[in-house]
Image (tube, grey):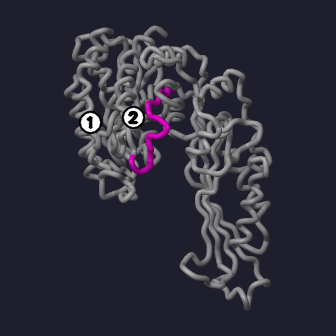
Amino acid sequence: MNAVLQYIEDNQKRFVDELCQYLRFPSVSAQPEHRADMAACAEWLANHCRQIGLEAEVRPTAGHPVVVARTRRTGKPPYLVYGHYDVQPAEPFELWKSPPFEPRLEGRSLFARGACDNKGQNLAHLIAVEAYLKTNTELPCDLTFIIEGEEEVGSKNLEEFLQANRKELACRAVVISDTGMPSLKHPALTYALRGIFACEILLRGPSRDLHSGIFGGTVDNPAMALCQMLAQLRDKNGRVNIPGFYDSVAKLSAYERQQAARIPMTEAQYRKFLGVPKLFGERGYTFVEQRSARPTIEINGLTSGYQGEGSKTIVPSWARAKLTFRLVADQEPDRIQKLIMKRLKELCPPTVKMEVTAGHGAEPYMMSPTSPLAQAALRTLKEAFGHEPISMREGGSIPIVTQFKKVLGAECVLLGLALPDDNAHSPNEKFSLDCFEKGSRMGALLWPELAKLG
């Protein structure tokens, strides 16, 4: 391994330059005007993979293409590495300190849209493989890279791609770096992600907005009715107030709670980081557990009536709310959806008409943090970063991980390289060059560890 690790160390400047090239593509999958940029970014990535010694193709889908790159097949244990080249929209542009697609280096931080989510993280794994190939060091595993262009819009076509190519993509596990770590001194294996169910509620009252003085008091106000309904979906202890909602939620093990307690942030620091006067969450759990291991309800949007300057004295004809429910291991989105619909029907007064539209959903994901696969990953993190790693849950959702399990029968090893202040999805996104370098080392050290599993 000495030659591989020395190669990574010796070529850091070039690797940063290549990451900057990658980041200059405004590969925003959500915006149709960037379709040509998406295609150009995929071609650049495939060409880069060929230059470092991989076989690579740009494979079409019904949406944006998938880049598939692989090492030469040798009959060794097969593994898959997943990432994405698409990025979030950069708006509002005025909040960026420098143009979002012109990378800016400040100290050991590289600022650009997509720096940590996910171009810097997936490039670190490609660097690791380049180091093997360019030093003629034998790779102990056969590797396939799947780098898609639709993660930020829900991986709309990747499931169909996996189904169509399941034999070609067969693997023992999938390695993903698209999550985070608490700090450089606390590298992390993410062993669980929350699932999600989204819906939109629309209440209709009178056929038109009404004069609140003339008609108020004789008709129900849809905005008031909706607020009263929503208020009953969560109790004063922070629990979701839907019968049966918690029935399948597994208790946290002693090991999980011990690992969560190792995350290096106090409640006061977390409150200051968020800029709130006081935290609120489900009683009986720490803020770390609340944000990663417990289910939630959130109102994402709420609107009705007049929103302009001054007053307009009306009873609005409609009110709308957008909700998301984050789900944890063993909660099934389809069952939860039925419970939510039943509860909303119970709460809706007969004075208004209700329409509920189901949105996107994803199952929660969890692997055993004590499995041989997880333990191999933790050993790798310790060697690469020089610190004892943490096993942790993360509160977000990556819908495709459950599809890797269903379609390929493969567990996902989530080894995130982003730091809490990297501003993923926000203005002034950045990526630590220390995480970039150590992440490349981690990628190189991982394959011998996984090969030992037999």
Task: Give the number of the disc on residue 83.
Answer: 2
Q: Is residue 30 above or below residue 314?
A: above
* Magenta highlight on residue 227: no
Asked which quadrant contains residue 67, the reply is: top left
Q: Which residues are magenta?
A: 410-428
Element at label 1: helix
**Whole-number angstrom distance, CA of label 1 to CA of label 2:** 12 Å
Q: Residue furthest bottom?
A: 214
Asked whether 245 or 105 is in front, the reply is 105
Check contact, mark 1 vs mark 2: CB within 8 A: no
Q: Can see residue 258?
A: yes
Q: Amino acid type of disc 2?
A: Gly
Q: Is residue 409 visible?
A: no
**Could you tell me which residue is drawn at 62 percent across and 37 percent down?**
292
Image spot of residue 47 (x, y percent):
21, 33
Task: Check disc 1 and report the residue beneath it.
Answer: 45
Q: Is residue 158 left or right of residue 369?
A: left
Neighbours of disc 2 within 10 Å: few (<14), some (14-19), many (20+)? many
- Residue 144 x %, y %: 35, 25
Name the spot of residue 16 as percent of width and height, x first.
27, 32
Dot 1: few (<14), some (14–19), or many (≥20) neighbours within 10 Å?
many
Left or right of 211 in this view: 300: left
Specify the amino acid type for callout 1: Leu
Q: Measured along the vertical axis of the image, is residue 100 above or below residue 374?
A: below
Image quadrant in which you'd find residue 210: bottom right
Residue drawn at (36%, 11%), measured in percent from left and top?
A: 140
Q: Which numbered disc flags the more N-terminal residue, 1 or 2?
A: 1
